[in-house]
Image (cartoon, helix red, strand yellow):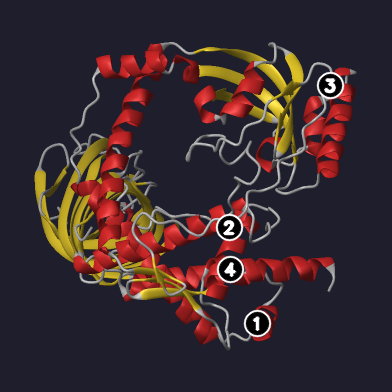
Amino acid sequence: MNQRWTAVFTAFLVFLAAFPGARAKTVDEIALVADGDSMTQSELDEAVQNYFLFQRLKVPDPQSAAYQDALKQVMDDFIQQVLLAEEADRQKIMVTEGELDHAINQQIEGMKKNFASEQDFLDGLDKEGITQDELRQSVRKNLSRKMKSVRALRAKQEELPQKNLVTDEQARAFYEQHSLDYEQAKFSMILFRIPPDSKPAYAKEVQAQASQVLKELRAGADFAAYAKKYSEDPGSAEKGGDVGSVYRSQMPPSLAKGIFSIPERNMGIVKTPDAVYIVKLDSKGKTDYASVASNIKESLKKESLDAALKAWLRVLRKKAYVEYHHKLLPPDAGTPTAAAPSPSATPTEEENQVQVFSTAPVEPGGSLGNNLIPGATSEISQSSGISNLPEEGSLSLNLRLGGWLYNTQDLSNYYGSNFGGFLASTGQNFPFGYDAVLGLDLAVDPNFQAGIMVSALIKTTETVPTSKPQTINSPGSETDQWSERVLGASLEAKLIFPLEDGVNAILGGSGGYFFLISSDLNTGAIDYPLEGGGFGAEGHGTVEFFLDAMKATALDIEGGYRYLQITATGFPTGAQQALEFSGFEAGLGLKIYLGK
């Protein structure tokens, strides 16, 4: 198998591993049971392998501590997801079929992108002994559980008290107790990884390579070019090794101690059991309290909320029945432990190198968690779990303000056909008019809405200079002024297409009847009131951005075209004329999804 197909097939296996149960098994033992859900041994093995594959790490020996830690993490995540999904069912937190189908289609389409063609994808399924229906059902089961669990967790977050304010005194006390955590370093780096359980000889080779690169850098080699060439951290390598400014608390203690030991505007090597870093330190120093006070308060508030959530999850776990290989797992039990891993090779002392050894983990969510620490990079895209789409049967309220974008010259017919050849300039100046729309939509299904809207249209006052032949009874020029206001009701339909998490594209159309409610023509001497009505239609495209975590409120940026001609009476000539309200338009809207 050539290199391209090896990469494609590996991507295929990784995807399957992300969805336990996708692969067909003839005989497979149930390994883990959590209430009404389960994982087979092969599913569990694949999920653990996936844990390492997505971090571009070699899968360690199953008896190693690293493998056992990953196994425990996978089991804990599965158990928690099952319990939260059950809680969602108890609270009647639903995931509609439309939402689920859309998510399934997105996952499978994403999988197909790893293949050169549709046929290659089908051949890959066939080689694994999986039908398309089996794959779809497996993805459905896992996505349903995941989406329910995220919604149950968010519902609990909304339910917990949000009034735990942190005072300035508490925040300042925390700052004083953890003042070192707020030291900040601005640096660039070149990362050389040492895979888990590497032999001492390999670790020495990595250290020797880093030392040679450091010598060349000190001799004048370009750091940015070397970072792009050598660094195994894609995020910083693309920027020439630049990491930016980072707090000490955002780094593992071992890495922080090494970096802060390097003098400013100098380079050095920081060694850990799983990596060697060449660090170019630009600056370092302590951050004052005022600049971090708001972050401290938010962090302490989040810590309080997290503690409450963990306590709630422990209650759910105590009520659950969990079995691992036919043995009951008590709520506080872990997975079987294995022999401790072999110690990493002790590096040799070298001139001007900083040596630090620690296996302290990175705090989840730390800004360096996906850049500096080997194995921390994750390629799994996690959405918020709250669907972009409305639930079937739910309502949404829409408010939009907009205006016309170009000159419609809606008076040209009147002056061209009724002024006996007299000349009139009917051009308008921007803005040409405004509209306000209030709508109420019903989700027939998550991707389709139908509803009603009320529109108020205001054309700005138009001043039309007219010219007539010079006569005794005619002054030679006149000025007409127009004002037009319309109110109408329309039926509308919308198709919603999620673009990404928190962003939708919407195509819509509407049609209805409109009335002149306050319109007149003032010729300078006489005011002619106009009245009339007409049918109109509109088509528009919208990009929608959600403004909150629950995706209940959104900002809509809209553009479209309206066709509307009002047949009006009351003109000086006595004839009916068409007032034009057609034209391209743009607007901003606020949408509230009442079902979320």
Q: Number of numbered discs present?
A: 4
First-in-chain label (2 vs 4): 4
Amino acid at the residue labelled 2: Tyr
Describe the element under mark 1 as helix, strand or loop: helix
Cα separation, mark 1 vs mark 4, equals: 16 Å
Cα separation, mark 2 vs mark 1, equals: 21 Å
Residue shown at the point (30%, 59%) measured from the top left: 317
Question: Which residue is identified by label 2?
Answer: 51
* Label 4 neighbour load within 10 Å: few <14, some 14-19, many 20+: some
Report the quarter where the C terminus lies: bottom left
Number of the front mark, 2 or 4: 4
Tell me if label 4 and label 3 are in contact, CB under 8 Å: no
* Residue 269 left/right relative to 24: right
Q: Position of residue 413 (x, y in %)?
A: 31, 57
Describe the element under mark 2 as helix, strand or loop: helix
Residue shown at the point (21%, 53%) measured from the top left: 437
Q: Position of residue 320 (x, y in %)?
A: 29, 65
Question: Which residue is identified by label 1?
Answer: 128
Q: Mark on residue 350? A: 3
Q: Is residue 375 above or below residue 61?
A: above
Q: Mark on residue 76? A: none
Specify whether residue 492 is in view: no
Question: Which residue is identified by label 4?
Answer: 45
First-in-chain label (1 vs 4): 4
Number of the front mark, 3 or 1: 3
